[in-house]
Amino acid sequence: MFELKHVSVEKNGKKIIENATFKLEYSGLVWLKGASGSGKSTILRIMCALEKPSSGEIFYKGLSIYEFDIPEFRSKCIYVPQMPILGQMNVMDCIRLPFSFKSNANKIFDDKKLNDLLEYFELQDVAEKDVTQLSGGEKLRIAIIRALLLDPECLLLDEPTSALDAKMEQKTLQLLKSLSDKKLIVSSFHTESIKVFCTQKIEIKDRYAIAS
Amino acid sequence: MQSQVETISLVQLIISYFMLFVAFFVNYTENLKLTKDIIYSFARMSIQLLLIGYILKFIFQINNAFVILIYYAIMVLFAANIVKERTKVKFAHANIIIFGAIFIAGFVVTLFMSFVSIGLKNPFEARYFIPLAGMIVGNSMNSTTIAIERFFSEMHQNKQYIEELLSLGATSREATSEFKQKAFRSSLMPQLAGVSAMGIVSLPGMMTGQILSGVNPIEAVKYQMIILIAINTAICLSVYILLSFEQKKFFNSFTQLNI
């Protein structure tokens, strides 16, 4: 589904990623591994077209991602940052907000799925709260729920379990694993327990990305 | 309009300046150290107004549409420059965008007022066009300043949030609409507050001027109502044009933030 060809990223004169080349299947859970500051977020951001690489190309279903209408592409390939802000509104409004975007016009808001996900992530009681009252971990889970409701073809997650306790971490990994049967999930994780769940590993070492 | 205003002789004008001695006296007794400022401000005001008085007298005499338009463009140029200096923000083509927004909004609204509201046959009647456009441009200047400042600070403070929305499929317009709304609101609020206080807290300048020159207060009130509506329209239009162009400056052609 995704293919990176000789992708390099340079920021403020410093090379972050050098000559990254790898292919990803249409489904699966891909573990983006690397030390903090190694460029994992940068890889996810360039895959979501939030940043343009300094050189190299990124293909999605055989086409360069820059040949797509970018908002349309991003609605298929959603990126969730490590510490989402979510704005200043009610949690429900925040979850519904992207459904008002033109690129998501054909997506239907599934109330049942929302309730199931809120229950799964133990967030039923925060639905009526204001986003600003949520903790970092709650915000992250709400951002993941929002992304899942949009049902993208590909999910790009940046440390989705970083602010979660051990139990919630396992639940999240299990959910991602089950979802990865039908969609591609590329995610960075700080935990080694992802090993048993992931189908592919991309390791970033000294600016180079090695697929295995 | 009949001219019943008492003319002020040069002697009377000079004597009136003696009122400033009160300011000098207060300044001296209270040790405010403002002598230079008072002299500078009032000298500058006197020269500027006298100069503009003669220029206007000349323009009113020739009453030529082309000259009026040149005068209008210069007025907008000064206003746009003040906006740029006050806001201290930098973005590509800032001069053209600010100038264009104020120029177009002021021009369209002044023409509508002249043609439709007042019913002039010739909309480029200097003694109507210049003061009306002047009031409109002055107000648009203040509003666009507020709008630019607010929009810039919102955009810079919410960079990460905007990217969050972009990564969910938002267009640049959708991702910034909340901040455009905030900028729009803050630029409109001062005028709306002023409009509501009109007649109770303050008697507006134009109306006062017309009453002083002998116009029936009811006529003066009608003019004032129209100009207030016109100002509001021009503010909306200029801020709308400005924000529409300005918003695009924050993104490249791939809907990526470039701040």
Image: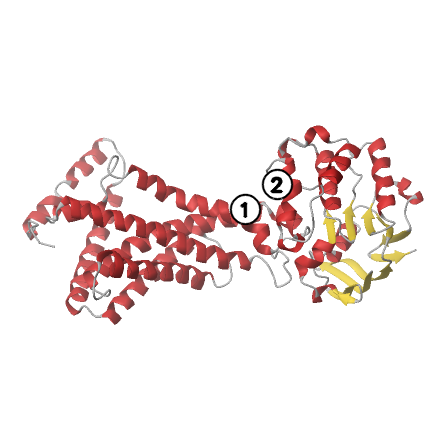
Q: Please, which chain is the residue tagged with disc 2 on?
A: A
Pick whichever, A11 or B187, lies toward us.
B187
Residue indicated by mark 1: B178
The relative height of residue B70 versus residue A37 in the rendered view (above or below) is: below
Helix, strand or loop status at disc 1: helix
Mark number for residue B135?
Answer: none
Residue at x 70% of width, y 28% of height: A125
Instruction: Give the amino acid at mark 2.
Output: Gly
Q: Is residue A12 visible?
A: no
Q: How is the image coloured?
A: secondary structure
Q: Please, which chain is the residue tagged with disc 1 on?
A: B
Dot 1: few (<14), some (14–19), or many (≥20) neighbours within 10 Å?
some
Instruction: Give the amino acid at mark 1.
Output: Glu
Q: Is residue A8 visible?
A: yes
Pick whichever, B119 or B14, lies toward us.
B119
Mark number for residue A87?
Answer: 2
List x then y, in percent, for residue B138. Answer: 32, 53
The C terminus of chain A, quarter of image: bottom right
Residue furthest to the top in view is A125
List x then y, in percent, for residue A22. Answer: 86, 61
Residue A5 position by quadrant: bottom right
List x then y, in percent, for residue A141. Answer: 74, 38
